[in-house]
Image: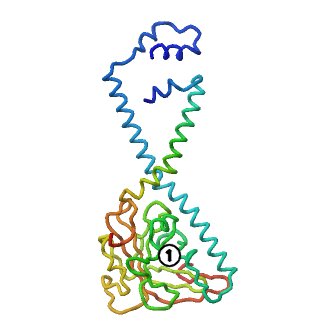
Amino acid sequence: MNVAATTDGTQEGTDAPAAPLARRRRPGPVAMAVSFFGELLITAGLILGLFVVYSLWWTNVVADRKADKEADRVRDGWSHQATGPGALNTKNGIGFLHVPAMKNGEILVEKGTSTSVLNNGVAGYYTDPVKAALPMTGKKGNFTLAAHRDGHGAKFHNIDKLRKGDPIVFETKDKWYVYKVYDILDETSKYNVKVLSQIPKESGKTKAGHYITLTTCTPVYTSRYRYVVWGELVRVDKVDSNRTPPKELR
Amino acid sequence: MYGWIWRHLPGNAWVKALISLALVLLVVYVLFQYVFPWAEPLLPFNDVTVDNQ
């Protein structure tokens, strides 16, 4: 060991004196063990640090890239495909959510709330445990959505910026559905599936109507509780040829 | 550990540094591409839905 180190160390130096070599004596076994353990700790710290970088930055990069591509496909499909029977194609996303208070542009909405869907930087509508009522059907019910608070696009990161009365606009191929926030639950158990009911009683509603529910995790960076925002449909605008957004988005 | 790796890399200090850099990048790549995506669902940071589970 010592010899190997000596030859390595002196490969470049033409005449390395003997003195520094003597100082580089092999440390005792205890010192070796301690330094090895220390290096392991440093490595663990670096890996944890990298994991933070991964979850808060890299997953956003990947998810946004995917979501942008998917959104382009949806818009492309809207402009080329003629309306006909079965025009509702739920495979590629059904529309876009615009929440001006969250200041993050448009959020693609796709079917399902599994990790594989939400990790693509989109909002998903619930199919389980309670099926969301899609606004395009025109039926009364609750349009329930979920998206990530942090990482993977973090589409609902600013959900706490929403106040009562703020607009939530859902855009489909030919309609703008304008909702207004009427109640917020800033902390609830993750088992509280009642918030997804077609008539969300916890928000004070007792009659069937056209509701929208946004759910995500809270507080930020953890999944301890769920944050819920309820909105009610105010009006439906037809999309014109220029796709002029409703006044809430201007 | 790191000292041992450094001593066993070939070449002079510059070559060693380059190889070390490549090794570090490889480790970061493997972590980001395989290890972290595997570990993430096991950690309680990113469950956003309300459900019965």
Q: A64 left or right of A150?
A: right
Does the image show residue A165?
no
Kind of residue indicated by mark 1: Lys
The colour scheme is rainbow
- Secondary element at tag 1: strand
Task: Return the residue nearer the eye: A85 or A172.
Answer: A85
Which quadrant would the N terminus of chain A be assigned to in this image? top left
Establish if A17 lies above or below A172.
above
Q: B32 left or right of A227?
A: right
Establish if A8 lies above or below A74.
above
Establish if A236 lies above or below A121.
below
Q: A167 left or right of A72?
A: left
The percent coordinates of residue A171 (x first, y second) are 55, 81
Q: Residue at x 32, y 67 (%)?
A: A225
Does the image show residue A115?
yes
The percent coordinates of residue A57 (x first, y second) are 49, 55
State how many labels appear.
1
Task: Return the residue nearer the eye: B26 or A22.
Answer: B26
Q: Residues within 10 Å of mark 1 (few under 14, many from 20)?
A: many
Mark 1 sits on what residue?
A111
The percent coordinates of residue A37 (x first, y second) are 34, 32
